[in-house]
Amino acid sequence: MKIKPLHREDGVELSRLLEKQSPDYRADFHPFPDEGAEAMAELLSSARKDRYRAVIFEDEWVAFYMLRGWDAGFDRPSFGLLVDEARSGRGIGTLCLHAAMAECRLAGADSCMLKVARENLSARKIYERAGFRFESLCPATGHEILSIRWKEDPVGWKGVEG
């Protein structure tokens, strides 16, 4: 298994991964306004600080994750993840989360955030086990915003070490 940084030429494969998931499975994951191959290629080629990664097992894309928001000027990135529906429930999401958290820390970020649907209990469990805590609700979607901080702060995130 390998984690591959994505580039312009990976737009077709990323689009294919997103489109092959069932509508029910992807009901709460629509991070891009256009998920066509050309739009994905443009997104990947325009990323400077944001990071887009594929997880590949035996030459098959089994997941995609991203850390984005840096290119838009935010101090902390937002984590997003899609595990291929046929491969879900096998620990790939946990692997991606921990790889992304390590990338954040290596890049100097002292925190990371994500959004998760309240009904997505399996994902919430993974995030909370990793140290993410409820921060607020997203007014646009109603999803929970969870965050993790690696440095002490007055809000009380003591003991959260990655």
Image: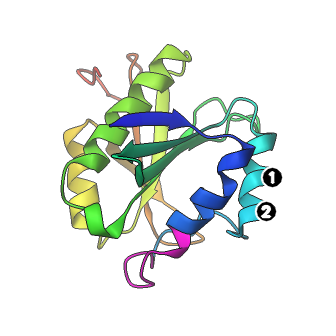
Mark 1 closeness class: few <14, some 14–19, many ≥20 residues within 10 Å: some
Q: Residue at x 41, y 41 (%)?
A: 147
Q: Quarter of the image holding residue 32?
A: bottom right
Residue behind mark 1: 42
Q: Quadrant of the C terminus?
A: top left
- Residue farthest along the bottom direction in this orientation: 23
Q: Is residue 82 visible?
A: yes
Disc 1 residue type (three-letter):
Glu
In the displayed structure, 146 sits above or below 5; it is below
Residue behind mark 2: 38
Q: Of helix, strand and loop, which one carries label 1?
A: helix
Q: Quadrant of the N terminus?
A: top left
Q: Residue at x 67, y 68 (%)?
A: 35
Disc 2 residue type (three-letter):
Glu
- The magenta stretch is 18-27
Instruction: Tell me residue 36's x, y (percent).
Output: 71, 70
The CA distance from mark 1 to mark 2 is: 6 Å
Q: Quarter of the image holding residue 97?
A: top left
The image's colouring method is: rainbow
Q: Is residue 79 visible?
A: no
Left or right: 94 with respect to 134?
left
Left or right: 10 with respect to 137?
right
Instruction: Work out whether residue 65 or residue 121 is closer to the camera in this orientation and state it.
Output: 65
Q: Main secondary structure of the magenta part?
A: loop
> Residue 124 lies in magenta, yes or no?
no
> Residue 25 lies in magenta, yes or no?
yes
Instruction: Work out whether residue 154 or residue 157 is closer to the camera in this orientation and state it.
Output: 157
Q: Residue at x 27, y 21 (%)?
A: 158
Dot 1 and dot 2 residues touching (CB under 8 Å): yes
In the displayed structure, 18 sits above or below 60; it is below
